[in-house]
Amino acid sequence: TNQMLPDLEEESIRSVSVTDFMNNAIQSEQFTDLESVKQDLESVKQAPAPPEPDTDSDPETDSEDQDSSQPESLPSDHLSVDETAEKDDEPWTKRILTKKCLRWLAVGVISLLILDAVLLSIFLTERGRDSVVIAYVPETICLDWIPGGGKSALCSASDTALGGEVPNLLAKAIKAASAEGVDLSLIPAGLAHRDIRQGEFTEEDARAVVEDSGGLRRERKRQLTDGGVSLVSLRATGLQIRQILTQSLEAAFEEGYDASYPYSAGLRFTVDASSQHNKLGTLELEAADGTWLPTDENQEYSVITTQDWASQYLQASGTLTEITPLSALLKYAGETKSLTKPTFSTLEFTESKTDRGFNGVINVPKAICLEWLPGQGVSNICSREETSAQGGGVANVVAWTVLEYLHAGSHDIDMFLLDAADCQVDIASGTFDEQDFQLLLPYNHELVFLIVTGEQLTNTLEQAIHYALLSPQNHGSYPYAGGLRYEVKASESLGDRVSNVQYHTRGRWKEVIPEREYRLGTTLPLADGEKGYDDLHYPVSRIESPDLKIRDVFQKFVTQRGIIEDVPLTKYSTQSFVV
């Protein structure tokens, strides 16, 4: 580049001189047309270079010789032509541009080489930092999500019978990294992705534990994030903590959502996977002295959890912390210098009866009330007062059981809808047999799958409730659903009775949007527009439905579970019924 500079400067001077010559000539009106300008410019380009000055010669004589060698119309200060101009056939402008390009190309190449060297240095520095040992692992710490799920690459399912050790350790690290006074941490299993091998533990190992390789990010439906997930602190009552655990367990035991299984530090609980609807058992909180005490549903506790869970399950934002799973694990490992197996947040885990092998007896721990229109009084075991606020449990149990069966069979259905009269008897406590199935669901209607808009769904509820209120003979048309809930004001006019319509997806409730399309499962009579369900007769489209019938589905799924239980009131389709 330095070798180019003298020639480049000389050519720049030459270009400026010729340009000035042309401007001066035109301004002095020495040229009358363009052709004469070109001719004189060519004569300038072909003019010989001035001779080297002779220090021994007479200044006045030299000055006269120089004046006589130049055109009379051209001042001497406008000519600075290199001897190479006589030999070079290329235009002088092209040579200047070429040299400029070469100069900038050389500068660019040198800059890229410098940048590469800097980046390589940074990479090697970071790589070296990642390889620094920050802790020692005396014994392999096993990964799993659902207890006994077999997700670990190094441990057997029996090693994780109470859950994964890695997510328990991660929950412990997050609680330890939090401010003093935090009672518990609560996280989804899916924040942990790798076993922790015995031996040295580096920053690179920590990143492998909390950062997904890409499989989960390809499926956003899992609602999971990597080691950079935001954590929030908030105040939650014992009842709200139970709500988070209950809904995350529901999501965990739906096919494909096992990464939602909850883990905690400072809290432990029992889980009964064989229970149809109430899988969460006892909850105990660790006191300051290390003892475990039952949680108080009315007392507030300081909780750190993921921002996603706070918004999904509590509709709360919380206070954003600077802690991430990765930073918490690095800090914990750096401070303890030894990563040992943690205690388990799942105190006791009972697998489903399907996994153990069903013994043929279907148990009903507690009686479940039949009701059609809320407060009507068709039940033989429950009073009107017990069913006036939200209706009966039987139709809700049937609707949710059918929906869960469809989900387990990979049928992509958002909610299942039936009318109250599909169910004819209470479900008494004790055992349940073949005859009871026939008494409960005598009609065994065919199932139909539809695509409907949110507006059609709300209108269907309005029309069905209106039809059910017309006379006592129509009370059996009152709608019940699994995966759908709403509030009813019976005293309002048609079109204003139903409000706050929500559907259940991935362990949480979301508002039904009028313009959005939903996949609805229902019975053939309702799909044909009978009993006031007129809008269902004109869906967006009908989906090709499998050969399934409501009683057969209910019986098959309950037989697999071996138990029939009422659903929580939060999952009843009628959330409130005001006369």
Image (spheres, rainbow, N blue to C red):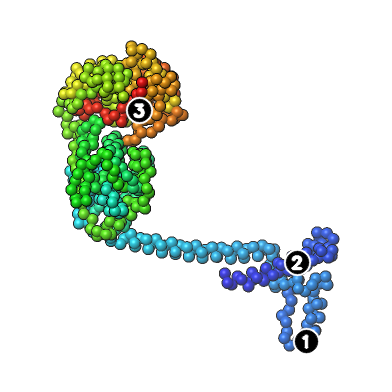
Q: Amino acid at mark 2?
A: Asp
Q: Any mark on residue 530, and which?
A: none
C-alpha gap between disc 3 and disc 2: 87 Å
> Residue at image x 30%, y 56%?
330
* Residue 44 image point, x, y percent: 76, 68
Foreground label between 1 and 2: 2
Q: Secondary structure at mark 3?
A: strand
> Residue at image x 24%, y 47%?
266
> Residue at image x 41%, y 64%?
121
Q: Any mark on residue 58, and which?
A: 1
Mark 2 — residue? 20
Q: Secondary structure at mark 1?
A: loop
Q: Amino acid at mark 3?
A: Arg
Foreground label between 3 and 2: 3
C-alpha gap between disc 1 and disc 2: 30 Å
Q: Residues within 10 Å of mark 1 (few under 14, many from 20)?
A: few
Q: Do the residues bearing badges 3 and 1 touch, measured as CB atoms within 8 Å?
A: no
In terms of sequence position, does the residue under pointer 3 or pointer 1 come before the other? 1
Residue 408 placement, left or right of 500:
left
